[in-house]
Image (cartoon, rainbow, N blue to C red):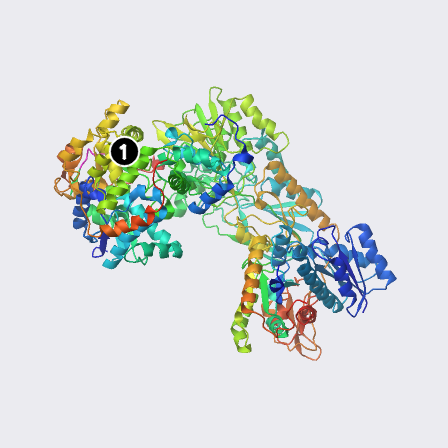
Amino acid sequence: MPTNVINITKSADSSFIGQVAKESGQNPYLCYQCGNCTAGCPFTEFFDYPVSKIMRLLQAGQKETILRSRAIWLCATCETCTTRCPCQIDVAQIMDTLRVIARRENYVSEKEIKLFFDTFLDSMKKHGRVFELGVLLKYNLRSGKLFTDADLGPKVLSRGKIHLFPTNIKGREKVEKIFREFERKPRNEQ
Amino acid sequence: MNNKRYAYYSGCSLESTAKEYNDSLKEIFKVLGVEIEEPDDWSCCGSTPAHTVDPLLACALGARNLSLIEKMGLETVIAPCPSCFAVLKRAHLKMKKDPEMRERINELIDEPYNLRVSPKSALQILYEDIPPEKISEMAVYEIPELKVVPYYGCIVTRPKEVAEFDDPENPISMDRILESAGITVLDFPFKTECCGAAFGVVKRDVVNKLSSKVLSMAKEVGANCVAVCCPLCQQNLDLRQDQINSLMKTDFKIPVLYFSQLLGLVFGISPDKLGINKLVVSAQWIVDSLKKAEKRGKKIKEEPEAEEEQ
Amino acid sequence: MSQENKRELKIIGFLCNWCSYGGADTAGVSRFKQPTDLRIVRVPCSGRVDPLFVVKALIGGADGVLVSGCHPRDCHYSDGNFYARRRLEMLKRLLPFLGIDPRRFRYTWVSASEGQRWQRVVTEFTKLIHELGPLHGEKEKAFE
Amino acid sequence: MRVGVFICHCGNNIAGTVDVQKVAEEMRKIPGVAYATTYMYTCSEPGQNEIIEAIKKYNLNRVVVAACSPRMHELTFRKTIEKAGLNRYFLEMANIREHISWVGDDRELNTKKAIDVVRMAIAKVMNNKPLYSSSFRVNKRVLVIGGGVAGMQAALDCADGGLEVVLVEKTQSIGGMMARLDKTFPTIDCSICILGPKMVDVAQHEKIKLYAYSEIEDVKGYIGNYQVTIRKKATYVDWKKCTGCGLCMEKCPSKNAYDYFNFGIAPTRAISIPFPQAIPKKAKIDPNYCRYLTKGKCGVCAKICPTKAIDYDMKDELVVEEVGAIIVATGYSLMGVENFPEYGGGRYADVITGIQYERILNASGPTAGHIKRPSDGKEPETVVFIACCGSRDKSLGIPYCSNFCCMYIAKQAILTKDHLPNSQSYVFYMDIRAPGKGYDEFTRRAQEEYGVKYIRGRVSKIYPKGDKLIVKGADTLLGVQAEVEADLVVLANAVISNPDAAKLAEKLRISYDTFGFYVESHPKLRPVETNTSGVFLAGACQGPKDIPASVSQGSAAASKVLSLFSKDMLESDPQVSYVNPNICVGCMKCVKTCPFGAIKEEELRDGRKVAKVIETVCAGCGICTSTCPCGAIQLQHFTDNQILAEVNAFVSGK
């Protein structure tokens, strides 16, 4: 939480509010801060800003604070907030949009989550489908946390729950083509 | 109804970590006469990661598969994995709502998608297309000791604009399906609480903590088994149950089965075909306590004496 | 505003006193801006609107005619707007025989509280009439 | 023809975007216009005098005032020209404010539009004829629909004012919602103690005729002369014989009937008297639960009734009452818990609604005033109140505030502490809305003196854990989740209109809003009148209201009726249809189409049959006029000529 004074007039970024509204198709001004999203959100206890505060920060145009927050990355899109919002705001959609913008503008406070997502997508780009073991190993390498979930290894392998080799689909270059369309967007960490 | 053919989009998880979901579903579909056909050369739906990069990308990845299915000439596709289901359904709805979006996406994918497919979850098919009598008729075994809590997870029924099925707050489809198979289902307040979803690898502690809430509530209401319909939920509750126990200092030993596995068991399908052995927390006792169901009639409890008649 | 958009067309509206006229007032009180082409005639009930008025207006020099009354079932005179609907439906089918594009005539329901709806109706209808252009000789249309 | 045109600046409201001088100039060019001027505020006294002077000075015989909407000031200016000796129907208004200056910014275009509109008004006024209203007798009886506190107040005030009152109550007893309440805010005085005497007054007043358990079937007629058909629903008990001894209720074996009075918090008997103070205190059988009426056997009540009042064969009965005015006071309903699945949607016995809690608190309620929770009869230690359940919730289609929940929650929390000193109450709220006299102080007392803990945030979910209910909400001021382990949860569920509100409105020909609440004719200046003269509103049927507001409206509506009835004769509006017998061919199409049956067939001396309008019945809609194939029947002041004159003035104008 910032303890310093927020100079609303100076720091309010109205173009940011507009951008989020446009990309998410939601009107942030509908929110009247009832707190239902925060109340229902399973991740509130792990967030740096609870969802309702994110909504408030959005109304106040506090771009920096929002895009630097960890909350937008920890949201798992469980849709509880969206389901219970009395103002019919698709809050999960807004969180998603904020994540997309943060990625695009190189604010990533939860590098590991992003890294995992990237690894996942790389795998499917490569094979057309996701090669779970590959994803796990590559993520461990990239993140330097070599033994993440190592304890699970035996469990899954002994039960033949996981393939040792990727399945490559015929149309994988088509899938790759889809990805290439989005490559143009900056994806590198700051 | 029975001779209706469905497309079947298994998705990546059901090919590996959730193999038992895949197998058991196909088994019970056989029994219930649900004919399925898998699209050739389907690709991954992109799941959560895709829409954190770009909603358009997520939509395109979904649309590619939808167009494959459309070519098969089948109007309904079963997507057992809620995550796949959500992606496919969202893609379908978005393209339906926004013709301009449809344009852009159809440019991206090889074959255009013309909105002729309706994606449904496995639950929805069993709940809406299969008469409950059919299910009870096929349930030739019973498991008296079994007390199940149905755990639906987040996105099978949420948000209701996308799922267009069951109640987002208190879904009952899985309850009813299992009940009609003569399985005892307990009222479960945490049917739709989140287990931590895709963060298993990255934020293990978060996921373990959230999943433990679900398990302890299951224990609270006196359940000895959790029924699920989502690979991620199953992973987080079953595969990670030891992690949970060591982190939260608990001693859960609750088998977490796919609802299709439970159905399979009472249908009398062999446990191996249902991949019971693939479960991390053993469900052997359930298998052992299977017994032939004599006259199911006894099960239907007769009207309680109206207390006014005293 | 350029001279071009200042060229107005002649649109006349028959509004029932209880609902639509009030709706137009509400729009005014709430300052919902509208195009200026429309001139309003107040009638007690949309049921008072004789199809003849519409025809005479269109033949006499109007480019569009709008009739607006209470919502069905909410008529101050219980079912006046049903009579209106029936008659005006017939009229719509009739206009082509007079060589008039039926889109130049429209009837709608706006309640006294629906200022916003009234703004929308006026704006859309005026836009439509401008798309269809003048029904009569050009000369009399141009804004002096 | 000497027309005077008076164009109002309305300060800057009109003159700001309309060149009023130019309009005046243009008008002077029109043949027949003898005088045209502008004035700062035409409706002001000097402004009106200006018109009177001008009429005399330039001996004008027609007047056009171009100003605001005629719905605003037509009557004002009609009176003005009358003062100057002109017939009031020689006035026309041109609406150049609401329809022009306020909705367009372009001065040039606005001015052009104003010129047209005033020209149209001039064209019409030149075709106006003098009209004279005839007068008719008023039936000085009033119908009050709804026996809640608003309706009772209206009925009593009218009756005390000497009027005969017909009071129709849908349920078995008068008293409405207030009769169910335990105490009332902010004074904590006993609800039934202050309402009971009023109910008795209603029962004993010789001028009030009460129809309980009855509904409005049909309404015919017009202000001053209504014929109202009332359906007396079958009670299966002859109320002339029933003494209200209650013996039947004790002996009735069917003990699981739904208790409407207690909102189902506890079951009642199939035959019952809703509450001790009920008026009339008569028993009624619920046919859905009565064994005799459902299964054909039993008949216990018939056997034990000392006065043999039971009548299983009773049928509904229709009666007609004639009245001159109607006061609608039908009150409100409450949103059902099934709309809150996240709060259990009715699956948890200990999640109840505010009105149900009132019954639990109430000494005459099912728990005799002891706070026991429904599930196991335990005394709750922790009680949670949740505000805005459904209210201000767009996702449930209720954007409005229910007006009095904040107050009754504070009251119930205070009473809980009084009943159970060891209890702790929590209130989840979004805003505390307590604008009334002594209201905010009251909500403060709840917190300062009674230690009620207010938590600012909504509740997302309620679920059972052991014999507790976990209330999972948020404290938005702290920005954290807030959980309370409750024994009892009370939902302040939204106030909604009655399910049959629209049906009644259509019978009365009054309008209702999208939520089913009745619409007053002016939100500020005519709050208890409707656009249908002779029909008035009181209480929550017009929108959520608390007791003081409802009572004031009851009195207000009554005073409206009393002043209406202060004259023996009413002036009829002369803007009615008139048949020219020389043109009428007697096809009688008009007779069929008239919604009011105001046209009858009449035989002339020469034996010709023609249509004739009953002036007092005609409501002036003009449907007949546009139906008549030969233009024989004309709605005066809106004749074909007058309307076409307006049309031509515009379309043929340059």
| Name of the residue lying farthest toward the right | D57
Mark yes or no: residue D250 visible: no
Mark yes or no: residue D648 visible: yes
Within 10 Å of disc 1 (Cα), the crowding (few <14, some 14-19, many 20+) is some
The percent position of residue C68, horizontal first and vertical second, equals 58, 62
- Where is the N terminus of chain D found, in terms of image quarters? bottom right
Does the magenta portion include B147?
A: yes
Residue A92, placed above or below residue B2: above
Q: What element carries label 1?
A: loop
Give the residue at mark 1.
B200
Residue D383, placed above or below residue B25: above
In the depicted view, which residue is nearer to us: D68 or D77? D68
Q: In which quarter of the image is residue D547?
A: top right
The amino acid type, in three-letter code, at marker 1 is Gly
The percent position of residue D494, horizontal first and vertical second, equals 50, 40
Residue D447, placed above or below residue D346: above
In the depicted view, which residue is nearer to us: C143 or D118? C143
The percent position of residue D477, horizontal first and vertical second, equals 49, 28
Query: How many numbered marks have been drawn onto this rendered protein structure?
Result: 1
| Name of the residue lying farthest toward the bottom | D606
Q: Quadrant of residue B237?
A: top left
In the depicted view, which residue is nearer to us: B225 or D8? D8
Does the magenta portion include C102?
A: no
Instruction: Label the magenta part by its dominant secondary structure.
Output: loop
In the picture, measured across the screen, residue D620 lies left or right of residue B273, that is right
Q: Quadrant of residue D18?
A: bottom right
The chain letter for the residue carrying disc 1 is B
In the picture, measured across the screen, residue D523 lies left or right of residue B111, that is right
Q: Give the range drawn in magenta.
A: B143-148
- Where is the C terminus of chain D found, in terms of image quarters? bottom right
